[in-house]
Image (tube, rainbow, N blue to C red):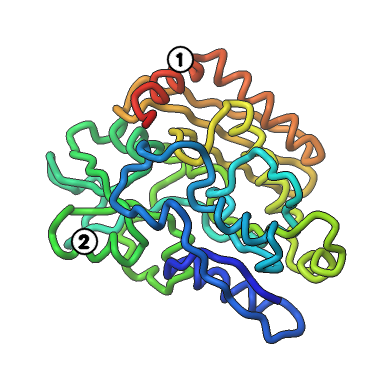
Amino acid sequence: MRIGTRGSALALAQSAYVRGLLPGGPHELEAIETSGDRHPDLPFGGFAGKGIFTKEIEAALLENRVDLAVHSLKDLPTDPVPGLTIGALLTREDPRDALVARDGKTLATLPAGARVGTSSLRRRSQILARRPDLELVELRGNVPTRIARMKEGRVEAVVVATAGLNRLGLASEITEILDESWMLPAPGQGILAVQIREGDATTARVVQTLHDPAAAAEATAERELLAGLGGGCLVPVGARARARDDRIALAGFVGHPGGHPSVRSDVEGPIAAAAELGRALAATLLAQGAREILEAVRGEVSP
């Protein structure tokens, strides 16, 4: 089968991992350049619309140029694409964010005024709420490039997903894993999604063997929260669901990139009600002030 993927080091590593799990073969990786990759120096606010890391891959899937696509779930918009469906969600990697800093520094030991690189409004918001004395610097590029820029001295530290570092064999670079008690990850972070064409029963049967129900329940709760907030992958929304036995707990966060204001709340219930819990938590956060925060942010970052 032909597997559509972004061409970044992390995307290729993730897609190669999925390829290795698929029965049969040989399966081929087809690297597809996305608009987000085509303009690596453009801040995310400069892009119009959603799916900046997925649209071109989805087009290839719809046009039968590839048989399935592998995405980081956090990059996939919550709005469904007609003709496509998620065939499998893989077992979740560590969803937490990690600090990679020079001289083994942690967030607490970075000096005042230290430059921290991130392109994520969500990360910016939660870091500045904890360390308002730091300077947050717009920094895009793939994971190895961001780490290289830190080592070159352009910034003192970068914040990246622990899952990406693990998948690239770069876990030794981590100087601190940021605790979820104050740093909620992006909805779906750490989960790989396999996207297929609707009606492709053959591919659906093959990829279903990779599906993890616990990861799917967590993804459902987090993505319903995100959808209920009217957000995409670029808004300052954090979410973390934990599925255990027949229960699921969900925490959610919305914050201004300046560090304040912000709102955070949580909910718990039956795992069968994961979607409803996500929507309920979105309503709670909106009532607590998330609507005004998101409206202000969208007005500031719109291209």
Q: What element carries label 2?
A: helix
The residue wearing badge 1 is 292
On the picture, is 106 further left or further right than 27?
A: left
Quarter location, residue 169: bottom left
CA neighbours of label 1 inside 10 A, class few (<14), some (14 to 19), many (20+)? few
Circle 2 packing at 10 Å, graded few (<14), some (14-19), many (20+), is some
Identify the disc placed on residue 149. 2
| 1 or 2: tag closer to the N-terminus | 2
**x and y percentages locating residue 292 in the rendered image:** 45, 15
Q: What residue type is labelled 1?
A: Glu
In the rendered image, which quarter is residue 198 located in?
Answer: bottom right
Q: Nearer the viewer, residue 77 or 96?
A: 77
Task: Count the numbered circles shown.
Answer: 2
Residue 248 against residue 196 in the figure, above or below: above
- Left of 221 or right of it: where is 8? left
Q: Distance between the residues labelled 1 and 2?
A: 35 Å
Q: Are marks 1 and 2 in contact (CB under 8 Å)?
A: no
The residue positioned 39% from the left and 48% from the top of the image is 178
Q: Which mark is residue 213?
A: none
Q: Is residue 76 left or right of residue 205?
A: left
